[in-house]
Image (spheres, rainbow, N blue to C red):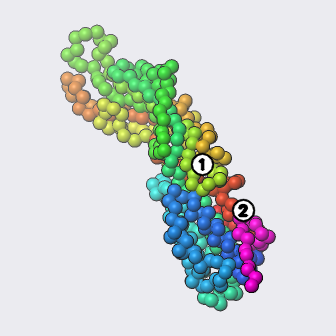
Amino acid sequence: MEVISYEEPRSWDDLGMDWNDPDPRDARYILALRNAFFERMAAPQEGYYTYSWNILHGLSPRKAVSAEALRRVIVELEYLCRFYYNLDPEVYKDDFSDFPRIMRLNDIVTQEDCEFFMNASYGAILDHGGEWLRKIKNAICCLHVVQCYRAWGTTLTRSGSEHDPPFDESIGKAFEYAFGDTQPSESEFKNTMPKSIYSWSGNNHWKCPRPDFEGDPEDNKDGYCGYAQCVAYRFRRLRRWLANSEVDLVMAAVIDSPTGPTGWSNELATSVFDAGESGFERGLNLVRTHVDDPTDFDFTFGNIDSIPRNEVVPTSDFDSEGVAIWRRSAKRGYEGKMYAFLDYECENGFKFRAGTGAGSTGG
């Protein structure tokens, strides 16, 4: 008895496959879908191989592909969506308060050439099987961005403050300290991912002239506290779960004007958005760098040498004796939440990725 063996496809282009006109009776195309799914099972931090295998066990070259097996392909696609992210700014609210969001099946099937029938009849599968295979392939290619949870590197910070002098001196001294010889300070982050990015300066109105003051009149003036601080991150290593692959590290930051009062202040009365020389814009910022070796690379996110300078003089409330009733502050700069993602739709990333294989779209 002759034993039929099948060579496993290692990419959409492998083994002479033509995705412009795939043959639903050709086992190579079914195996390519299965292997593309397996590749996407391995990329997220969570690996649910057993669950996915139970879903996909019907995709085999050694038995006929049933309508139930094809239905399970949709089930697996929907299951994997929960581990993959949609970085398209168009799908988010104007203020990006819903960022980040996992992929949704509806995000995929509404893309051009990714529409497919969810519950096809037997006849439809037979008559339109090639079209179904091609669109499922394109739909799978939409899954390529996972969240990066583990990284190693250095946190760089600058910080300076000055208490009590006139406004210009308070903010000037704060900058002098922040950019002094001992700055920036460095600390290590290990096996984790930083969550915030910021750069701002500010002042509060700390004191006013007191009517009963008996000392040097030069000391009986309005006094302010000045602050200047920023942070940046230098990444040196990261954890990626798909062995022998390269990735694009995508840093995302949702940036807006600073929030919260300064120290020794009750209210942030004025906050001015200013990205300085960071290159950021208000809203969603995506910065991408290719990582060919996740154990040895050098990438810095944020600009540690740029702090926007506050120019707004806040005004606090004092009683008739010069005692503070309600202190106000002002800030200029930016702050935001940051996230890290790994994008496998790059050279030497996923072998089964968009842009490869004839008839490719999606992604």
Membership of 76 in magenta stretch: no
Q: Is residue 231 above or below residue 40?
A: above
Residues rendered magenta in the picture: 1-19
Q: Is residue 74 visible?
A: no
The residue to which callout 1 is attached is: 249
Instruction: Report helix, strand or loop for mark 1.
Output: strand
Question: In the rendered structure, which amino acid carries the disc numbered 1?
Answer: Leu
Q: Is residue 263 above or below residue 208?
A: below
* Image spot of residue 354 (x, y percent): 68, 63
What label does residue 355 carry, if any?
Answer: 2
Q: Is residue 87 left or right of residue 220?
A: right
Instruction: Report helix, strand or loop for mark 2.
Output: loop
Rendered residue at 77%/71% (across/down): 17
Assign the magenta stretch its main secondary structure.
Answer: loop
Rendered residue at 74%/79% (across/down): 4
Q: Is residue 355 left or right of residue 85?
A: right
